[in-house]
Image (cartoon, grey):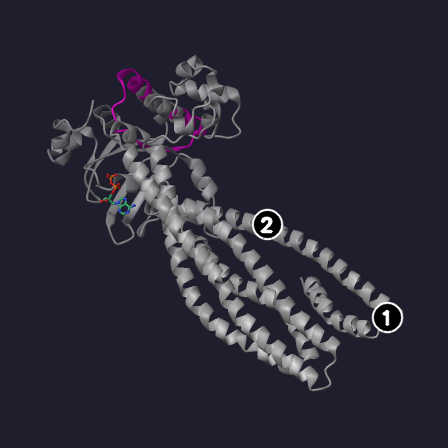
Amino acid sequence: MVGVAAATAASAWIMQAFFDAISSPGNRQKIMLVAGAVALTFLVRGAMTYLQQVMLAKAGNRIVAQIQTRVFGKLLRQDAAFFSATDSSDILMRVTQGAAASRALIDAVVLGLVRDLLTFVGLLAVMFWQHALLSVLFLIVGPIAALGLRVILARVRNVAGKELTSVSEIYKILQETAAGVRIIKTFHLEGLMADRMTTAVREVERRQNAMVRLQSITVPMLDVLAGLCIAGILLISTTSLAGGTTTSPGQLMSFVTALLMAYDPARRLSQTRVQVEAALVSVQLVFDIMDRQEVLTEAPDARPLPPPPHEVRFDDVVFEYQGGKRALDHVNLTCKAGQTIAFVGPSGGGKSTLLNMILRLQDPTSGAVTINGMDLRAATTASLRAAVSYVGQETFLFSNSVRENIRLGRREATDAEVEEAARVAQAHDFIAALDQGYDTPIGENGAFLSGGQRQRIAIARAVLKNASILILDEATSALDNLSERGVRDGLRALTQGRTTIMVAHRLSTVIHADRICYLEEGRVVEEGNLEELLAMGGRFRALFESSALTE
Ligand code: ADP
């Protein structure tokens, strides 16, 4: 860029030699020299421009790639609370728009502020060298233009912010349409969704038009100012020439050339400023994520968990969600190695929150969750993840083959091991009956499979993982009888010999648990085995006798 700027300034400066040479046409040798210099200057300028563009694009692409990698890494290190509090469409918008805006910003800053500024300064130097007095006149335009620009910039910030809100709305509508297609069809909401989309799209269109108007207004604004200024300078300069001062026609020509050339980068600079302002609004969105604290990081002195069997304890655990909502209130619990402990209680009692603690998707606000006496926060992430496996209500499957989905439990498992796990989970028979057996693609989040089948695949995944602690969130939705029995048998095989901590909704599961905890408003209000709790005649008994637990 320095090369481009220097070559540009040189081409204006050469005008003096060129015109002085023309004024004395006898000197052929000098004219040849000047012509050669002009050719050389433009050659250098062309080569430098090429180099600068390629290098800048490379750097820009690299920076965008780095930002996306870093922001994704940051997202992976956020806890469950972050993801439940943030719309996924919002995350999507931040990462895509933000990265694109960073790119625009880099281009604008580097191209504009560096190349144009260097070029402008170089040309200004030529102007001052050739005619200092007139150059000062030219500079008067600067402050006037800056004043106008300030008003425009404030508007730009405002419009850019509103535009992003609308873009985010578009992402949200798209996402909800894909996820909620059943509801949209059955309740005939196509018209509603189409209207929402039209509103959002029109809004973005409007904002973008406003942005173009703002960016374009800088051009006529400067044009008028510069036109007046250049006309004035021309008038004064010819008078000073006629007045017979020391200025030569060559000098004056060189000055005017530099003046006209300087106008272009000056105009671009003012536009750059507007672009920078608009891009900054988007870039800010990415950095909101980048600057977030990483909550679930590994302690610097983390050690691996002790070997299994594993006992899980809650020591006076309190957990509050952002905003102070207390979900766990001084919970003390021991889940003995190899035993199954079932949590029951009303919705909102804190059962899921409790499971999240053991999975270390959230850390306690106070107190500690320990495995064999070791605080989860002191354990290495790898050893913790290896020790605990999870089967949830909503079984999340990746759009991949059945085999690959099961293999996620242990990525180095052989095909035979995958099949063995599927047999244990009562999934082998239905998988074998699929079109392509284990290689059948299952669609986005298992769209081609039934609820019971999805669940048995999730169980197979956990069987393959063979972790010593199992966290289970029992499905509330009724499965059909056949797959229900399959799922139940699969689960029973899975819990064998493992420390199992589960949220139970079924009578059959509760009956088989070694211990039962009744959780209400974040507190364990009743605890014991089935006989003890029934004998107590309290809340659990009432639940047991009502039909709240499904068969
Ligand atoms: P359960 O699983 O027993 O139905 P939860 O553990 O889901 O109960 O919820 C316990 C309490 O914490 C509830 O009052 C619920 O409203 C609140 N809660 C759950 N998740 C969040 C969240 N992400 N932000 C704020 N409050 C939450």
Would you say 523 lies left or right of 118 here? left
Q: CA distance from mark 2 to mark 1?
A: 48 Å
Is residue 220 visible in the rendered image? The answer is: yes
Residue at 24%, 42% in the rendered image? 350
Residue at 50%, 59% in the rendered image? 275
Q: Looking at the figure, which quarter contains the N terminus?
A: bottom right
Would you say 136 lies left or right of 326 here? right
Range of magenta residues:
459-487
Q: Nearer the viewer, residue 260 or 497?
A: 260
Would you say 182 lies left or right of 39 here? left
Image coordinates for residue 147, horizontal then vertical, percent: 46, 73
Q: What element does badge 1 sit on? A: helix
| Relative height, residue 433 to residue 341 (above, below) | above
Q: Looking at the figure, which quarter contains the C terminus?
A: top left
Would you say 127 lies left or right of 141 here? right
Quarter holding residue 515: top left
Quarter holding residue 446: top left
- Disc number placed over residue 62 in the picture, else none: 2
- Disc number placed over residue 525 in the picture, else none: none
Give the amino acid type for the residue marked by disc 1 in the picture: Lys
Quarter of the displayed picture in which ligand 1 can be seen: top left
Image coordinates for residue 302, horizontal then vertical, percent: 47, 49
Q: Which residue is mark 1?
A: 30
Residue at 37%, 54% in the rendered image? 162
Image coordinates for residue 136, horizontal then vertical, percent: 60, 80
Give the amino acid type for the residue marked by disc 2 in the picture: Arg
Q: Nearer the viewer, mark 2 or mark 1?
A: 1
Q: What element does badge 2 sit on? A: helix
